[in-house]
Amino acid sequence: MKRIGLLTSGGDCQALNATMRGVVKGLSNNCNELEVYGFEEGYKGLIYGHHRLLTSDDFSGILTRGGTIIGSSRQPFKLMREPDVNGLDKVEAMKQNYYKLRLDCLVILGGNGTQKTANLLREEGLNVIHLPKTIDNDIWGTDLTFGYQSAIDIATAAIDQIHTTASSHGRVFIVEVMGHKVGWLTLSAGIASGADIILLPEIPYDLDSVCAAIEKRHKGGKKFTILAVAEGAIPKKIAEKGKKEQRKAMEKMLEKYPSVSYKLAHDITERTGYEVRVTVPGHVQRGGSPDPFDRILSTKLGVYCAQLIMNNEFGCMVATVNNKIVKVPLEESAGKLKMVDPEDQTVKLAKYMGISFGD
Ligand code: F6P
């Protein structure tokens, strides 16, 4: 008999359902009796005891379904130790709800913040396993997160679509790609779609270099330029400042603009006279069905998680390292961000073929 809890926390992405299906199918195929409790809307459900018993029907036909069948919400890690508005001790409440259901393990699907809380629960003595979800691919200790590849497909398709209009009108186009503070998604989608300029948070940009790259293309006879810009892209001048000043300078820079791409568009036009348009695919990048790659990845992660539960091994993240599914202790990975290395081979090869990173 195994009794597990499932929760999906933070921003959603493709393959959350596919991953949970992998866990449940892996378990139900290998233990006599299984009880699965789904906590609704992430940690909120665990704190307030909002859960429901899920049956095999719940996991049928969800391999291809986006979103999450149990809902998700953002519950910032930094507030977990603070009482809620009614003075409830959230950590204690989560532990009590876990014990009340006599769970063998709590399976937690989420990104970096979610992982920090999972680690906190481990420190508090709960059996937890973390499954790495995010289109940002920024979880330290795993080469891949599920959702990332599907988001690459969508961001790439968005930039592909822009190509035709950019060439018809001879315009400069900026496509702003999600990714929070890291540039994995922009780097991949930028290369996959043949973007001319790729701007990442990890490689702060210089406006002169960006404009020079555009001018060079135009002088070479190209009538349009496409920039893939990460939502966290940052100008060199601001990146050189300390953390606190950096935040203030970014806030000031964006006072009049919805995001960095609009400010950049304004600056490029002012400097070069070119007409610039901005496209922001936004949450579309997290939506819809997982692609086949993510379906396979999430199934493997989920089934490996089931194996860990059957072996009573907890306190870890199920990760992908060098194409193998492995377990990584939560205390090793929690609180660390995996960023693009500016010296990464992919970046170097892209530069060698003439893609500008604006540095
Ligand atoms: O972490 C996933 C992500 O989509 C980021 O790429 C983005 O910065 C953020 O979530 C958006 O968050 P929200 O859904 O709260 O607007």
Image (cartoon, rainbow, N blue to C red):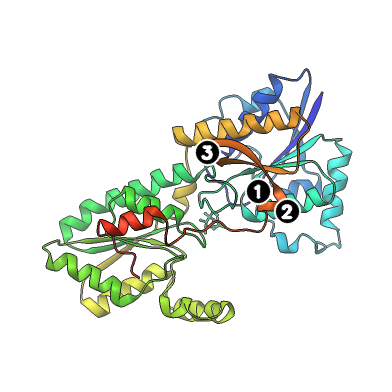
Task: Classify mark 2: residues with Cα within 10 Å, few (<14), some (14-19) or many (20+).
Answer: many
In whole angstroms, how far apart are the C-alphas of marks 2 and 3? 24 Å
Q: Is residue 358 above or below residue 347?
A: below
Q: At x 77% / y 33%, what residue is drawn?
A: 4
In primary-sequence order, the first of circles 2 and 3 is 3
Q: Position of residue 249 (x, y in %)?
A: 50, 81
Question: Taking 241 as reference, is 310 left or right?
Answer: right
- Residue 281 appearing in the image: no
- Which amino acid type is shown beneath numbered disc 1? Ser
Label 2 sits on what residue type? Thr
Look at the numbered disc 3 and give the secondary structure of its residue. Answer: loop
Camera-nearest residue between 182 and 54 = 182
Name the residue carrying label 1.
9
Find numbered disc 2 in the image and state the secondary structure of the residue it sits on.
helix
Mark 2 lies on residue: 117
Residue 320 pos. (x, y %): 56, 40
- Crowding at mark 1 (Cα within 10 Å: few <14, some 14-19, many 20+): many
How far apart in space, not on screen, are marks 1 and 3 (Cα)? 15 Å
User: Could you tell me the amino acid type at mark 3?
Assistant: Gly
Residue under pointer 3? 66
* 309 over 272 or under it: above or below: above
Closer to the N terminus: mark 1 or mark 3?
Answer: 1
Q: Residue at x 48, y 79 (%)?
A: 240
Q: Quadrant of the C terminus?
A: bottom left
Q: Quadrant of residue 274?
A: bottom left
User: Which residue is at the far left?
Assistant: 221
Q: Nearer the viewer, mark 2 or mark 3?
A: 2
Residue 240's label in the rendered image is: none
Quadrant of residue 90 in the image? bottom right
Q: Earlier in the sequence, mark 2 or mark 1?
A: 1
